[in-house]
Image (spheres, coloured by chain):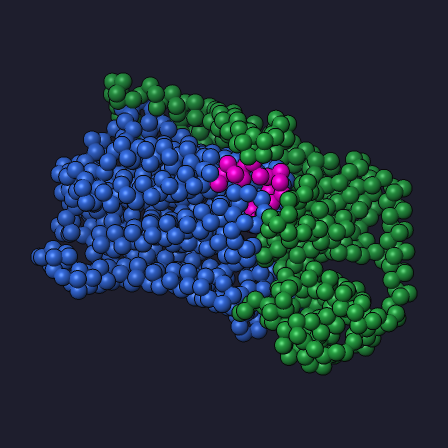
Amino acid sequence: MLKRAQALFLRSLGALLALAAVGKANAESAASQLNMPQGVTEVSQAAYDIHMIMMWICTVIGIAVFGFMFYVMYAHRKSRGAVAENFHENLLVELLWTIVPAIILIVMAIPATTALLKVYDTENADIDIKVTGYQWKWQYEYLGEGVKFMSELRTSQDEIYGREPKGEHYLREVTEPLVIPAGKKVRFLITGNDVIHSWWVPDFGVKRDAVPGLFTSAWAKTDKVGTYVGECTELCGKGHAFMPVVVEVKEQEEYDQWLAAKKQEAAEYASTIGKQWSFDELMAKGEEVYNRSCAGCHAVNGEGIPGVFPALKDSAIALGPVEEHLRVVVDGVSGTAMQAFADQLSEADIAAVIHYERNAWGNDMGDITQPVDVLNYKQGK
Amino acid sequence: MAHGPATLADGWVKYASRWIFTTNHKDIGTLYLWFSFAMFILGGAFAMIIRAELFQPGMQLIEPEFFNQMTTMHGLVMVFGAIMPAFVGLANWLIPMMIGAPDMALPRMNNLSFWILPFAFAILVATLFMEGGGPNFGWTFYAPLSTTYAPDTVNYFIFGVHIMGASSIMGSINIIATVMNMRAPGMTYMKMPLFVWTWLITAFLLVAVMPVLAGAVTMMLMDINFGTSFFDAAGGGDPVLFQHVFWFFGHPEVYIIILPAFGVVSQIIPTFSRKPLFGYSSMVYATASIAFMSFIVWAHHMFTVGMPIAGELYFMYATMLIAVPTGVKVFNWITTMYKGALTYETPMLFSIAFVILFTFGGFTGLMLSIAAADMQYHDTYFVVAHFHYVMVAGAVFSGTAAVYYWLPKWCGKMYDETMGKVQFWIAFIGFNIAFMPQHFLGLAGMPRRYADYGLQFADWNMVSSIGAFMYGAAQILFLFNVIRTITHGKPVNDPQVWEGAEGLEWTVDTPAPYHTFEKPPEVK
């Protein structure tokens, strides 16, 4: 009762405030924010159902218990002339309120178990997708298809810091969404590259921690075509709030086309790896890659964060032999936050970013690092 | 021994020496209480920064890096600095007076266990001003974010946690020794006030799990500085091991916080109902079973980590069972009020709010125990709302009730009832405006520890922030009321203070003399 009353009170209060703040609040959008989504998969439906069962059981018990309590608080006030009795034990009552809740719990456990079995039913999948959490982006790999890409936040820093108005999809948009076909059972094999992340798509009822060194699995199958947005739900550092999950469910035919295009793209990239880039081309590309993938720690001006992340400006690595620089970027530095970028960035990206780091912010090496150098370094191991 | 404690009139040196070298349980209790209140204000200030940043979407006031330091420090300071020391302070003041003992069993250790605490927190808070900033990995400090990827100041954090742990262990040993050895003749175990019982059980929990926490942070220390790989999969370790060890400490820890709160409420409700506590022995057994169960449910904090289904099912069933003894306690409190003669002084208001809001937090706890639904709730604001209902409306409300209830006994002055009631209503309404919407936010999909959020969460975040500021303001009123009581309160001389109060602490003079029960009372 209290919960309902508070919910109602707050709903109206919230609506009022929303009216004042935004100037346009409609009852539907306010209402849709109050409860768990039913989602589009069997698992999310099961979670929703058990959630509602539990909520109603708790509401009924709450009304009974608090109702009795409020009656007592009103009826047995001293100011109404109540005189205290002196009883302090009643074996029957005490046994009853131990046994009855225990029975209710046993009844609750049955649907709770059924729902959980559904969550764990990851066998016989049609498609396997490896999901890897990075600080602070997701990598999706279609196992057996040779398709692999990074999915990063697309919202600009200017929107985040209020220098530009926030777009409709603020913090809910990525460079490249995960695409899956409708009607197929998709298994997600989830792991982490650096720290623990957690991959959550509320509408699929899928939330699994992405633990470095371990694989966890989850599954989804839906007929509903559309775009579904989720989040990272395990604290993973300063970009925790800025690595959304976006999944597009497409019809099988569209999915096949998309997959074919991705394969084509990969093949084309492989054929151009020997291309020689000019100094300025590499600088331009390098700046873009640096600001996206490196500036989070080493800062846009290359000065890092004192005491946490080293500076690259005037650093021994950036001004030293290029082999050492390649080693740090490609393989990472174990025991530190410096990751191995071999699988995160393409050869061209790595070449460009190394070139940029050696020639920006007053670093003046003047040498050129080509994609093929990166490839040779990788294969030379 | 004959002369009283040094006062300001004896000069600064003597006055300061009294507090630094004191072995008197009342002085040490006072030190603990003031320290915990200072930490409460500090942790509250961190919370205000968090809620101010979350008032609107976008980054306005602070950077995400500092936001993470704030959420981490808020949790650490509130759990280890505010709530736990507050209840240790109450234990110091009250346990000897409740069992008819002249002091704690180990008075010098008592002094030590308090005086290392300010250093622990000075070290912890100082990290905020160091290069690299303070701990930024959440109060649960999951590896490897807290090891390989942590700022260097993590070593200070580890040292601070070790000191806090040592302080807690010493405090608990003292409480166990006092309760077991220093009860007045005739004060059998089953005659002890429930506050003493809950603390005795809590002390055993502390002695059992604080070393586990120490083990966890020591393994971190080794991983960071000495090349071991306890929590690093690349070296053959396991990041999930950290979570198992942490929550084996962490779950009992939340009962360590709430059990003494149960004890406080079990003292206050009978007083203002003018009726003995209903079901005393079942209260004792329920407390003991909750304490036992707290050791066997830890992995319900880890339902999404990918445990085998057998593990998930076991931890789900075991967790659901906790509702039984917890329900018994709630029913007992309500039945204590049934057919009593109720009055609603400030301590009673806070206690009733405790019963309602704690039960509400218990309901959401039951929902969280259902693993399949927890896959959706986990690490969202639904969890944040749940544990603030049990930690704030539970532990903090009961601590506030305790201060109002025993303050007249401690200082011989009555607090301002109107101001107390005003504080209660601001706190109660502010609390619910702050945390009720967080349930909706969590269900709608907002993860916790987010420095920024999508536009669909904007409305409820704004409401929540407004409530949080209200709740914060109520604490300033609380501080003012307590100080004003000490300086200008109406003197109370009746040992009983409250009409319905029972127990040995109400048989000594008001204000309680510096030394009480130098001759043990006879308990019939």
Q: Nearer the viewer, residue A149 or B55?
A: B55
Q: Relative to residue B313, is residue B351 depicted above or below?
A: above
Q: Position of residue B292 (x, y in %)?
A: 45, 47
Q: Is residue A87 visible?
A: yes
Give the image location of residue B374, x and y in percent. Answer: 60, 41
Count the labels in the image. 0
Q: Quadrant of residue B108?
A: bottom left
Q: Is residue B146 left or right of residue B348?
A: right
Q: Residue at x 33, y 50 (%)?
A: B37
Q: Can you say whether B196 is above or below A328 in the image?
A: above
Residue B519 x %, y %: 13, 50
Q: Nearer the viewer, residue B481 or B502?
A: B481
Colour blue, chain:
B
In the image, B505 versus B384, the foreground residue is: B384
B324 vs A125: above or below: above
Residue drawn where x is 30% and y is 57% of the image: B174
- Of all residues shown, which one is farthest toward the left? B2
Q: Quadrant of the C terminus of chain A?
A: bottom right
| In this rendering, position of residue A297 left or right of residue A223 | left
Residue at image position (70%, 35%) is: A39
Chain drawn green in the picture: A
Q: Position of residue B237 (x, y in %)?
A: 61, 65
Q: Which residues are magenta?
A: B445-465
Can the viewer see residue A7 in this picture?
Answer: no
- Name the residue located 51 percent from the left edge and 65 percent from the top edge: B132
Q: Is residue B451 magenta?
A: yes
Residue B285 lies left or right of residue A29; in this view the side is left
Question: Per the image, is A209 magenta?
Answer: no
